[in-house]
Image (cartoon, helix red, strand yellow):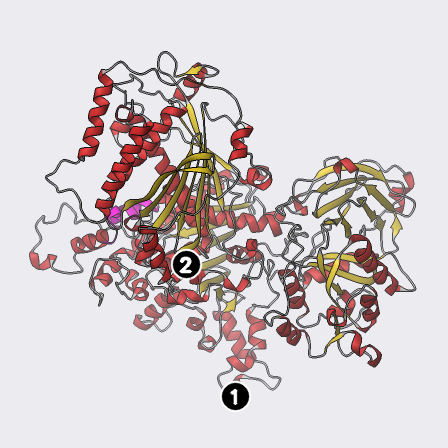
Amino acid sequence: MLTKEYRIPLPLTVDEYRIAQLYMIAKKSREESHGEGSGVEIIVNEPYGDGPGGNGQYTHKIYHVGSHLPAWLKSLLPKDALTVQEEAWNAYPYTRTRYTCPFVEKFSLDIETYYFNDDGHQENVFSLKGEDLKNRVVDLIDVVKDQLYGADYNPAEDPTLYKSNKTNRGPLTENWLQEYWNICKNQSTPTEDGKAIMCAYKLCRVEFKYWGMQSKIEKFIHDIALRKTMLRAHRQAWAWMDEWWGLSMDDIRDFERQTMVALAKTMRGEEIAENEPASTPEIESLQEEHEDRSSQPPTPPYVSKCTNQEPSSAITDSVQPRRASRRRRTGADALVYAQSASFDNLKIETINDTQEEQSSSEDEFFDCQNSTHESSQMVKWSSLELLGTEDDESPSESPGPSKANEDSIFAPRFMERRVSRRNPKDRGVRSHLVLQGCKSASPVLSASPTHQSSVPIHLILVFHAGTVLDGCVDASSRQSDIATFRASLDTVARQHYSSACGRLAVRLIPCPQPAASALAVISSLSTVPGDPGSVQQKIPIGALPVLAVQTPSYIECVRNTVIAANNVYREFRQTSVNFDGSVEIVADCMGSVLAYDAISGLKTEERLEFSVNNLFLLGSPLGLVLASRKLCGSKPNDISKPTSSQVFNLFHTTDPLAVRLEPIISARFTSTAPFGVPRYQKFPLGDGKPYHLLEFLQSHADQLGEENGDISHNGKLDLQIVSSLTRRWWGVKRLDYALYCPDGLGSFPSEALPHLFHASYWESYDLAAFILRQICRGEVNSSDDGGQSDGVFTPTDPCEKWLRKRTSVKLKNVGANHRGNDIILKEGMPQIVTARFMYGPLDFALTGEKVDVYIRICTAGGDLGEWAHMASEITDRSGRLQYTIPPNKSLGPGIHQVKFVVRGDHTSTGLSLCILPPKTQAAVFSIDGAFTASVSVTGKDPKVRAGAVDVARHWQELGYLIIYITARPDMQLRRVVAWLAQHNFPNGLVSFADGLSTDPLRHKAEYLKHLVQEVGLEIRVAYGSKKDIGIYASVGLRPEQIFVVGRPPKKNLTEATAISEGYAAHLATLNFPGLCLPANNNSGLMIPRGCLSLPGQDCLVRRRSVR
């Protein structure tokens, strides 16, 4: 969900604005209704009582928006779904409006508005709290400074030019806002000279939770459907003053009733004839009443006062979120619901992420997470303008070509007309503008404020040309795509790659689109005649890339792409003189073809001035282009190997344009599946599966060996074959990678899929995490804390001298091994945290030294705040430190982070402080009993049981708190947690024994009894070995709740459930419908997802998962 608060000041009073707004809405409804596909139906317009804001006017409208949507988006929806319903509750000075689409269930637009006689200075009129207030973006719309352009600009509506004849108000200067507020502040308005000021505070919440489109459409709605519309509407409300001035509310209600009748006629097709006057008799009679009233002495206006007063509690209390009673469905309502009843095949519903429906709502859409942290304004989103037009004939050529030459689908004039018909908005745009557009400078996407002075470590150049169905992609569309992509990278970097946070320089390379003319020709050959771009038109879009690279202008496109990339690189080096990092290229559909030819130096004298490390291709048809060149080329080997170190070809398996690259290099890979990119929400650092070429060749020798002689006696591929493949290969890793996409996309029309997939890449966290894994290897954060990593923590105080002289001698040349068990408490218990500070393999205690205690509080929404210094304490003789949080600073429910920093050398350790609400449910795992397949007393890397990670993750996804227990001494805490993190075990709380003990099992029993009896924890299931059966039974667990790996002894057969066939079979049993219920008492606790790690420790590199 994307939330913005718009503040729109106008030089009116609130009462004048009410008349102006209602008149403006009714008039615009008439002017902008043209019948089917574009119009407004007013279903209900009546007073209500005891609703939002108290008493007011309720309206229910249906907007027909089909003609305002791009063709590819309309192809996702059936004809009956191209409507939006509006419900509005107007109770001035408060209104609430909600927009929904009956056929798109997960779309909603909710607008709350307060009106005050001020300049918009009030900071929180909606009384937002917590994350809502933190994520709110404030946008001031100034009707003078924020200009409209092109067809949207009307000089008659320009506030700097308009002057009212009836009120003598206007025109407005550029600094009108400050001038009017200085005059009207604490004064009754309007003043004697007619000056007044008011502000509409609009809180807009937009949600569109569908795969691949959420960020794009939410930003599009805010920036185009909301901001642009509100700006023009408020300029019109001011400029139409002479029309509504002097009207009463009764006049407005009459006008609305007349409008309701007129709109009903328009939507039925009873339009006004061309020879009739534009205005209806009702409007003329209303205007005559205006003139009559203007000739009479004006009625003294209602006088209000401009103040700094915050919204009164009476208004706030009366506007608690309440849903007005549903109106009886009559007329159009019944028709709408009748249509929805027959709408069983709505395609868009198939792109829900149904595989995760059992998880929490925040994690249901892995690649559609909320982007409320972005504060930068986004503009028009990509792929809206479908096609450009071709260049006209040169003026130097004969002005009158023969009719025979014109009567050809290859004639430039025909292609120009064809392209412009696909999208009338592009009429008049020429292809030479497209080519020139690639030379424009790339917009600089600034880093976060805390890292603006840092030297970038990676330069990511995005070659953006759009899909083959795009013609002229405007600059704002490109910038929006790049801003979304940058936000995805930053989100993942903050969470897992702190060293790269704020140091990723993302630059746009705007590439020309070479496929426009090919599209015009191919669309003319469709077997289904009709308007270009229609949903029904079937065109072989897979042939477009092949035709595009055959056009004479393609070489010029490659040349301009190289020039643009070099210009951007030079500009970057001027601002980052000390840059010595790697250059990566990320290229979209047609941008990937241009990027490959630019790197390979295809038939152009221009060369890139930098070396490329990795080349990431997104939904690329490059394989098809290379296959065409191979088939048509005269040379036996005409496929060039790119000069980049590695190529990654990423695609969705249902993308009609994407093809594989591996079979182009070796026919042995025709029957191998592409490597599946792991889901970010489940495997943020990868799933540990190897995708290096050599590993794959040796592990799949039987699949890759074509003849008996290809496989040696030891079952491996022949060394000569391996050597030949590695020489030809484009890197050292696999080339083809499949990204996740919902299964239902196969039923979508092929012409709609390229746009949908193109939009999904930029907001995909799966893709962003994969890219960062390749360019930030070995730079993994140690904590998974929702985006604010320990890695960026720096102590507030400098290192100090040791308090004891012996300390520096005792700790010379030894490393720190500080540790502390995670602490679990219930609400109301004393909140005491304990840690131990030791050095070296012999555990030398840090005695009598100062340690700083920091805490990061977990909010109700699950996010962690800033580190706060709580106290400085002195360690005891055994190196222990115990700190009690004062009652006035006690923490609420949540998993909070605690960090201890030694003042003398800034070594540190951390732990989690979990404050539980009553009856929290948990799943307990014994590390040695449930996870390890081999026992290692020294704490070295033991083998993990197959499927153990999946079982632990299964209970995490059901909402249970995960607890790991072990009888190992706490001196092994760092090594054991590193082992858990290496194998991607889910987040959980860890408990170790306090030092060496002769009875290690006693620690487990006492710890679990404490959790059950004193903390009130409910243990749902427990996993372990046969030694753990008695421990789990002592805390009241039934046999069906205790799972033991292997076969328990005969005396314990009835006391536990044996997992005799391994975790894979056990997980299949758990997935049986209705067997495992989600945690029902954990709603008050935000349990972090992702992989387990230890706060406060140094980076624990996960060897297998960061490849």
* Sequence-wise first label, 1 or 2: 1
Q: Does residue 29 belong to the magenta stretch?
A: no
Residue 35 seen by the camera: yes
Q: Position of residue 281 (x, y in %)?
A: 17, 34
Q: Give the extent of the magenta segment.
A: 422-438
Q: Nearer the viewer, mark 1 or mark 2?
A: 2
Closest to the observer, 95 or 260: 260
Real-space CA distance between mark 1 and mark 2, rounded to the nearest whole angstrom: 42 Å
Q: Is residue 452 visible?
A: no
Q: Which residue is mark 2?
A: 757
Question: Residue 437 colored magenta?
Answer: yes
Front residue (pair 724, 710): 710
Q: Look at the magenta stretch and give its main secondary structure.
A: helix
Q: Which mark is residue 708?
A: 1
Q: Quadrant of residue 1107?
A: bottom right
Q: Residues within 10 Å of mark 1 (few under 14, many from 20)?
A: few
Q: Nearer the viewer, residue 600 or 551?
A: 551
Q: Identify the secondary structure beneath mark 1.
A: helix
As drawn, the label of residue 621 is none
